[in-house]
Image (cartoon, rainbow, N blue to C red):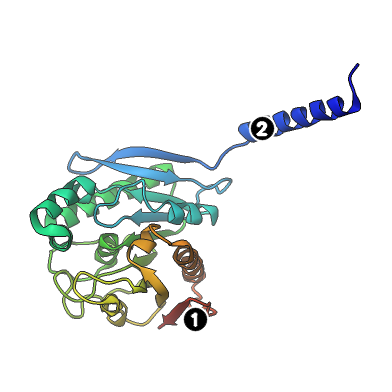
Amino acid sequence: MVTISQNRMKTAHFTAWFLVCLVLTLPAQSQQTVTFPRSDGAQTPLRIFSPLGQGCAPLAVISPGAGGTENGYTYLAEGLRDQGWLAIVMGHKESGPSDLKQDIRSSGIHGGIKDMVTDPLAQRARMLDLTAALNWAEKQCHHPYKSLLGHSMGSDTVMFEAGARNKLNVQGQDRFDAYVAISPSGEGSIFPSGAWNGIRKPVYVLTGTRDKGLEGPWEWRTRSYDGLPPGCKWLGIIDGATHMNFAGIGFAGKTKTLTLESIYAFLDGARRQACGAPSQQTGISIRTK
């Protein structure tokens, strides 16, 4: 004889089985890794985060820091995807973990990182990767709005592309509608005085009060904002955020949340051409001009 409790158990098992089957048949948010050729014949790895039901979504390309790969910055890519963006994290072979280890063995941690970020060949290779990412994206559809985001060495890629003058003779093409530079370089080995005064597109510069730079304290990173001309330019400073927190490493929960929320606000305002000062939040101060 089957008891009432046994019937309930069977019903519960069937319900759980049905829900699992339903989830498995629903379209998942797509995530894949592809490679796409550069103009020099090398291959650029791209990790793709595709939103659901967007048609041709706005595009967000993300450039990691020195030693990073396309497998990092997942929190940033997933956050943008969940806001309806097609997010692409680029891999940069010439400034990835293998090359960084070699530089560190030769010059120590500080010297090795500086050797990499001031290497014109490594920086120019990143621009080839950027073109490959754009070419892959354009093969999918013509995106209505394009943003470029980068952290640390990736922020150099952002500033180069936006039009910042530099000592490495790296040329950008200003192919994006808005830019986000996280932990950017100030004046020094890469950027001369006045490097950023020709950038006209919207730019968000983001740093933290423990985000020490290669050539100065965290305040050194704000010099890039100081050098930008007015017109949809933001500076965000997260209290207590370290350099690696922006990469999602360490006790980065608060930093990740404030980073994502402020980037959403900036990109939303830039797309609507309404770049006024945002409402202030605890833990981050934002200036605009």
Label 2 sits on a secondary structure element that is helix
Q: Is residue 281 left or right of residue 94?
A: right
Tell me residue 5's x, y (percent).
86, 29
Check whether the beta carbons of the residues at disc 1 and disc 2 lie within 8 A of each other. no
* Residue for point 38% across, 39% down: 33
Percent position of residue 152, x then y: 28, 63
Q: Residue 239, labelled with which disc?
A: none
Q: How many marks?
A: 2
Instruction: Report which quarter residue 279 is drawn in.
Output: bottom right
Residue found at x 50% / y 52%:
81
Q: Which residue is mark 1?
A: 277
Label whose residue precedes the other's in the sequence (1 or 2): 2
Give the CA separation, mark 1 to mark 2.
45 Å
Does 100 appear above or below 235?
above
Q: Quadrant of the N terminus?
A: top right
Helix, strand or loop at disc 1? loop
- Amino acid at the residue labelled 1: Ala
Q: Which mark is residue 20?
A: 2
Which residue corresponds to the image point at 48% horizontal and 62% vertical from the top-left? 253
Three-letter residue code for mark 2? Val
1, 112: nearer the viewer = 1
Picture residue at 16% right of the left edge, 53% below the top: 122
